[in-house]
Image (cartoon, helix red, strand yellow):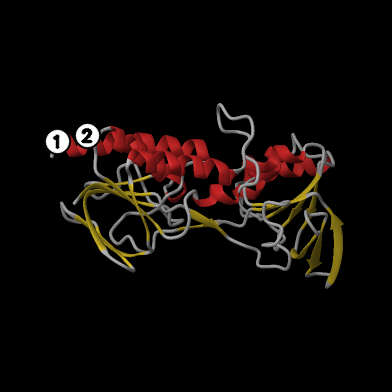
Amino acid sequence: MYDCIIIGCGPSGMTCALYLKRAGKNVLIIERSMPGGQMVITTNVENYPGIAKIDGATLATSMFNQIVELGVDVKFEDVIDCDLDGDIKSVKTDKNVYQGKTVYIATGATSRLLNVDGEKRLTSKGVSYCATCDGALYKDKVVAVVGGGNTSLEDCLYLSNIAKKIYLIHRRDEFRGDDIMVKKIRQLEKECKIELLLNSQVTKVLGDNKVNAIEVYNKISSTTKEYKVDALFVAIGRIPDTQMFKNVECDDSGYIKVDEFKKTNLSGVYCGGDVSNTHLRQIVTACSDGAVASLSINEYLRKR
């Protein structure tokens, strides 16, 4: 019987485990792949306070070693079902069944891929799914952004203060983002900071060791053109990893709803990091979620 079962060994889950273990709690982390989550595939982390520059895998390893040295129990297994409604929570994996008094969900979210040639090969080598994370690496460079919703428009606005030029590529002729965002993009278009490629799709990412161009197909003209770019930012949505959590309330986009204390609608069940309905998804905010959740979990256990 664990005081807390943490599902997901990303920065949020590891921070929660760190705080709980230091408070004397019996903690289990279940992770299906490797420690670190999306952090592992981040080439350069330059916005984590106190560390000027570090690669994501090194930071993830450091976090993981810290919790292991504290004595946090870690199982590399795939969670396939959960019973979170009662006082005792049950988590079933492909190998075992574990019980705990509380559960912290930190399973993260996966970026939607374009699924085009060269995308996976050049991920973290110019292909990025987070402009806030990697945009600063392309100061005065030419970049492309793919998407038509608020995320892609926000990425363009953010990058407009960094990049020399931005290609915004959208498969339709109208954006799905808010009107005020679209107006700002149109203004940047007038200022020649952004070139809109509408009714268009990226069909290939080019480059040997880094991105140097993309191929774009225009559906109206039925032609393909190559554009020289230094980076491609894909902003076509994310998929939260929530399918195994029955009765946990999610928003319209599938993210788990939490309050300011990281509580879900189920008693004793908490959530944080990219899988929650947070406004910003960064390493530092994921760590913050884990710390806040640990205090809520401690309070819950104390009252029990």
Callout 1, which amino acid?
Lys
Q: Which mark is residue 299?
A: 2
Residue 273 seen in the figure: yes
**Contact (CB < 8 A) between labels 2 and 1?**
yes
Callout 2, which amino acid?
Glu
Query: Residue 5: image x %, image y %?
Result: 29, 50
Query: Residue 203: image x %, image y %?
Result: 75, 67
Q: Residue, x 85% and y 70% (percent of image)?
A: 223
State the quadrant of the C terminus.
Answer: top left
- Give whichever of 116, 189 is nearer the camera: 116
Label 1 packing within 10 angstroms: few (<14), some (14-19), many (20+): few
**Residue holding disc 1:** 303
User: Is 75 placed above or below 188 here?
Assistant: below
Label 2 packing within 10 angstroms: few (<14), some (14-19), many (20+): few
Q: In the rendered view, does 53 fall on the left or right side of 49?
A: right
- Give whichever of 69, 267 is nearer the camera: 69
Extreme-top residue of the structure: 50
